[in-house]
């Protein structure tokens, strides 16, 4: 499996603290069957603003350790970028990374309050040639209240990335209900772990995937767990 959203790059955001934590989490991921992982630290000014170069250096250190410990997982770099109107500039000046240097970018919207110009911002990114992936829409309170809020984004070509653990209630009942609805309507494009710590999503994948099978059947199950991720990494 491929995971395109997690916070396991140590000492970068509110995720893994030390390289040992990164490695422990990656061992859990490996045991759960993940073979490729994109590290997507938060980019939120002013608190989380590590550059692409800084993140790449840490990624290299983790890759060396993985080799030493013979853990066969391929890593790449991205960011979870908090929505702002200068994302294009941030990509171009090396402040943030797209997913594995593709045209795909992972963008987070506010959790509680609707952002008035969110649609225009996302639309202008798509117009500029990016493929926008909206991170965990089921967690946004205004989406939980009105799922149709997402329709405009879907129509303009945005991808929706759900969190695996929403299915087992990690983010509350409303997020759980919302991800189930979105899956039933086949609106989710890909699922990801959004892992921050040891002993979280990767260790619960059996239970989560079993549950997922009730809401996503056959081809759609394959699409949300791996086919969409493969296309993203191929930059299709
Ligand atoms: Fe995240």
Image (cartoon, grey):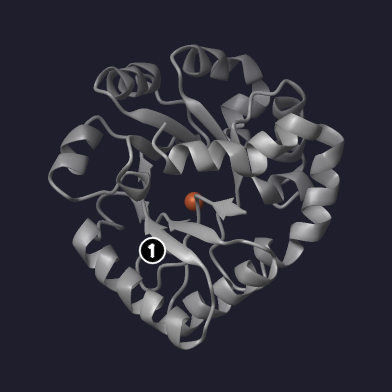
Residue 164 to residue 21: above or below? above
From this viewpoint, is residue 176 visible?
Answer: yes
Q: Quadrant of the C terminus?
A: top left
Judge the density around disc 1: few (<14), some (14-19), many (≥20) Cα neighbours within 10 Å. Answer: many
Which residue bears the numbered disc 1?
Answer: 13
Q: In which quarter of the image is the N terminus?
A: bottom right
Horizontally, is 152 left or right of 47 in the view?
A: right
Q: Position of residue 98 (x, y in %)?
A: 32, 44
Q: Where is residue 8 in the image (x, y as percent from the top left)?
A: 47, 66
Which corner quadrant of the image does residue 160 belong to? top right
Name, please, the residue furthest toward the bottom.
Answer: 68
From this viewpoint, is residue 216 visible?
Answer: no
Q: Residue at x 62, y 70 (%)?
A: 30
Residue 8 to residue 124: above or below? below
Q: Which residue is drawn at 24% across and 22% down?
A: 128
Q: Is ligand 1 within 8 Å of the beta carbon of the residue shown at mark 1?
A: no
Horizontally, is 179 left or right of 40 in the view?
A: right
Which corner quadrant of the image does residue 62 belong to? bottom left
Q: Which residue is drawn at 16% across and 36% down?
A: 89
Q: Residue at x 38, y 63 (%)?
A: 13
Horizontally, is 179 left or right of 92 in the view?
A: right
- At mark 1, the secondary structure is loop
Q: Where is residue 48 in the image (x, y as percent from the top left)?
A: 30, 57
Q: Nearer the viewer, residue 195 or 71?
A: 71
């Amino acid at each position: 499996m491929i995971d395109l959203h997690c916070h396991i790059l140590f000492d970068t955001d509110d995720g893994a603290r030390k390289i040992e934590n990164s490695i422990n989490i990656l061992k859990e991921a490996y045991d759960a069957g993940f073979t490729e992982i994109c590290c997507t630290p938060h980019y939120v000014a002013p608190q989380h603003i590590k550059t692409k170069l800084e993140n790449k250096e840490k990624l290299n250190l983790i890759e060396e350790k993985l080799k030493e410990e013979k853990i066969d997982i391929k890593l790449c770099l991205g960011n979870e970028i908090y929505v702002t109107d200068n994302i294009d500039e941030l990509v171009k000046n090396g402040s943030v990374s797209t997913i594995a240097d593709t045209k795909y970018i992972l963008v987070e919207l506010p959790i509680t309050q609707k952002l008035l110009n969110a649609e225009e911002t996302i639309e202008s990114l798509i117009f500029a040639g990016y493929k926008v992936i909206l991170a965990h829409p089921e967690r946004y309170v205004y989406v939980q209240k009105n799922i149709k809020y997402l329709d405009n984004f879907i129509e303009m070509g945005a991808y929706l990335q759900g969190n695996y653990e929403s299915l087992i209630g990690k983010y509350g009942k409303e997020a759980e209900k919302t991800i189930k609805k979105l899956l039933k309507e086949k609106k989710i494009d890909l699922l990801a772990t959004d892992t921050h710590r040891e002993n979280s999503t990767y260790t619960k994948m059996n239970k989560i995937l079993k549950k997922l099978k009730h809401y996503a059947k056959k081809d759609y199950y394959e699409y949300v767990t791996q086919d969409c991720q493969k296309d993203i990494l191929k930059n299709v």
